[in-house]
Amino acid sequence: MGKNQKYRTITFFKDYFQVFFDKQSKKVKAKIVWTFDLIEDLQRVPETYLKHIENTDGLYEIRVQLGSDIFRIFCFFDQGRLVILVNGFQKKTKKTPKKEIELAIKIKTEYEIAMRNKFHNNRNAYFMAYSM
């Protein structure tokens, strides 16, 4: 792809990620944004930065490290190219806390229901307008 073209687009669902992001220091925010740019720009993103969460249906973690501080931001793909950010947290143990994964899955389900409803509402409006 060309210099200004991207392989992925990162977007947000509601304010789940923004609440986490706003609490971070300027240096952590800069590292998160740098990692996002990398994920958008590279065709093949190394697992160092983006990794599938085992035993989940399409849930990934964006991995950010600044010094000894480790952060995880859960996300998933929509239509193959869109990265939807959900919750984030600072990792303090070797294993990702189960409650954080459960929250991410809950938000992903909420997103899928919202998109399904949006699709059906748009489709119904189209058919109503078309049949008039």
Image (cartoon, rainbow, N blue to C red):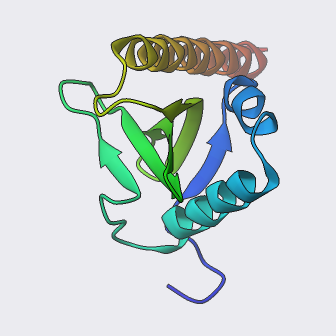
Q: Nearer the viewer, residue 48 or 37?
A: 48
Q: Is residue 56 above or below residue 103?
A: below
Q: Position of residue 113 (x, y in %)?
A: 53, 11
For the point 34% across and 60% down, which residue is it? Answer: 48
The structure residue drawn at horizontal position 37% and vertical position 39%, both measured from the top left corner, is 60
Q: Give left or right: position of 97 versus 128.
A: left
Which one is in front, 85 or 7? 85
Left/right placement of residue 30 relative to residue 38 reads: right
Question: Residue 32: where, in percent of width, then height?
Answer: 63, 54
Q: Quadrant of the C terminus?
A: top right
Q: Quadrant of residue 66?
A: bottom right
Give coordinates of residue 34: x percent, y percent.
63, 66
In the depicted view, which residue is nearer to us: 68 or 60?
68
Which residue extends farthest left?
55
- Seen at 51% across and 52% down, the residue is 64
**Spot occupied by residue 93 in the image (x, y as percentages of width and height):** 36, 29
Most distant residue in the front direction: 68
Work out whether residue 26 or residue 18 is closer to the camera in this orientation and state it: 26
